[in-house]
Image (spheres, grey):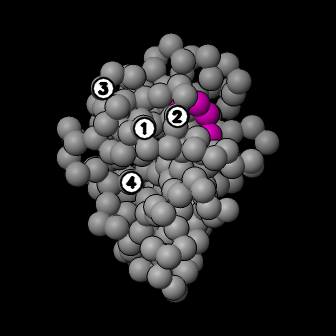
Amino acid sequence: MDSKQVIIAEGQTSSSIATVKLYEKVGSNWVLKRVSPAVTGKNGLSFTKKEGNGATPTGMYAIGEMFGFAAKPVGVKSRYTVTNKFHYWVDDATSKDYNKWIYYRGNPFTRWKSFERLNHTLYKHAIIIRYNENPVVKNAGSAIFIHLWRSGTTPTAGCIALSESHLTVLMKWIDPAKTPKIVIGTPDSIQKELIAL
């Protein structure tokens, strides 16, 4: 099924300042619905993402489910999980759980060398970008989300971040029935990815 919603995250390899644009297909035309300021990884965008390199991976990816420690916002159509202290995303590349969301009630420090707690303050609300899946490639990067920013000039560790108001609008706009995708890249690389749509 063809995608009828596309999120364009346009940035640079040398900067963490970015722009997110929402496009919806109406008939045979792509219509711009919203433009939002955004930030990416502290090392900008990367065409060869590696675990821990502080960059946001370029390319086209499916949009996954949503999560957050806060309640699901009214109007969100996607599957949403309210997280707690037992929800983790594993970024330990030596683990069989690498780049997976795991619910675990034991001591995480004895099971993994590195992990993200999904009840982190920046994960009040978050959207999963389905990066490095099927198969999961060790050290290719993990836990790539769209989440809350600290500020419009503070970079992330590799995710894309928006203000709370823009993130909430995006969450409500996404419709799983329209097979939403995200294209992350520089202006030139985005054009090449869009040819595939």
Q: Which numbered disc covers residue 53?
A: 1
* Three-letter code, disc 3: Ser
CB atoms of marks 2 and 4 within 8 Å? no
Q: Is residue 60 magenta?
A: yes
Q: Counting other residues with Cα less than 10 Å from the Cα at mark 3, is it few (<14), some (14-19), or many (20 or more)?
A: some
Residue 14: image location, x then y, percent: 33, 21
Mark nearest the camera among 4 and 3 is 3
Say if the magenta span includes residue 174.
Answer: no
Q: Earlier in the sequence, mark 4 or mark 3?
A: 3
Residues in magenta, as a range: 58-62
Q: Residue at x 60, y 56 (%)?
A: 94
Q: Which residue is the site of mark 3?
A: 15
Per the image, the residue denoted by label 2 is 49
Q: Is residue 50 above or below residue 169?
A: above
Q: Is residue 10 above or below residue 171?
A: above
Instruction: Report how far apart the C-alphas of labels 4 and 1 lie in the structure.
Output: 19 Å
Q: Residue at x 67, y 31 (%)?
A: 27
Residue 148, how many percent across, how many down?
A: 32, 54
* Marks 2 and 1 in Cβ contact (< 8 Å): yes
Q: What is the three-letter code of the residue carrying label 1?
A: Asn
